[in-house]
Image (cartoon, rainbow, N blue to C red):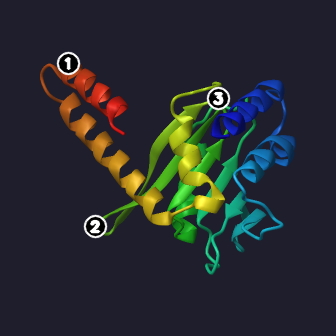
Amino acid sequence: MDSTIWNNLCEAVKVNQNLSEIPFEKSVANDFLNALDWNKLKGNLKEQFIINQHTKWRADFALFVPDNSNPEIMVELKKPSNRQNRKDRAQVSDYLKITDCRFGLYFGERLELFFLAFKGDKRETKSILKVEYEKDSPYYCDLLRLLRSNTYDREKLMNYCTEQLAIQDACNFWMKRENSDIILHYMMDYCKLKP
């Protein structure tokens, strides 16, 4: 079932590659989120969610869990032909920081999961997972498993993000060492084999 949801998204993005942001939001992204059981009828999805009254900033979607009026996941959309830049990343980061939401999802030329990490008194938005729109991609399983509404578990998503950050930190540490290419190769093999 997850492969069908993912492959349908990939096909829809391919067919609608030249759509502008609003039609992409209305069709492709909305259908994908509905397939993951996030929808307006259940009350766990809000479109054009106001981030800040003064600036008129709006997230394209905000995903909610029961008994919590704060958004659980902020979703930002760009057209599929977009190439993410610093401004796009800053937009997701700002939305997370302003709302104290820990998770962000970016739809554009790829699907990307962001995490608002706390290090001491600093808050940093980190990219956790990037998944290209390729049918049967090996990376979509984690993403769909973590984001499906009816099995969503904030703690599991938090743990996944924390683990991914630890792996990123380890890779960055070893990249600064002699023979880093060999070490990184073994680390990447380990990460692919890890259940």
Residue 29 position by quadrant? top right
Q: Nearer the viewer, residue 57 or 157?
A: 157
Mark number, residue 133? 3
In the rendering, at what x and y percent does residue 45 appear?
74, 64
**How many marks do you count on the picture?**
3
Type of amino acid at the residue the image marks with label 2: Gly
Q: Which residue is mark 1?
A: 182
**Label 2 neighbour load within 10 Å: few <14, some 14-19, many 20+:** few
- Can the viewer see residue 2? yes
- Tell me how far mark 2 sits from mark 3, CA to CA: 35 Å
Type of amino acid at the residue the image marks with label 1: Ile
Give me the residue at 79% from left, 27% from top.
Answer: 17
Type of amino acid at the residue the image marks with label 3: Tyr
- Tell me how far mark 1 sits from mark 3, CA to CA: 29 Å
Q: Which residue is mark 2?
A: 120
Residue at the left extreme? 178
Q: Nearer the viewer, residue 92 or 39?
A: 39
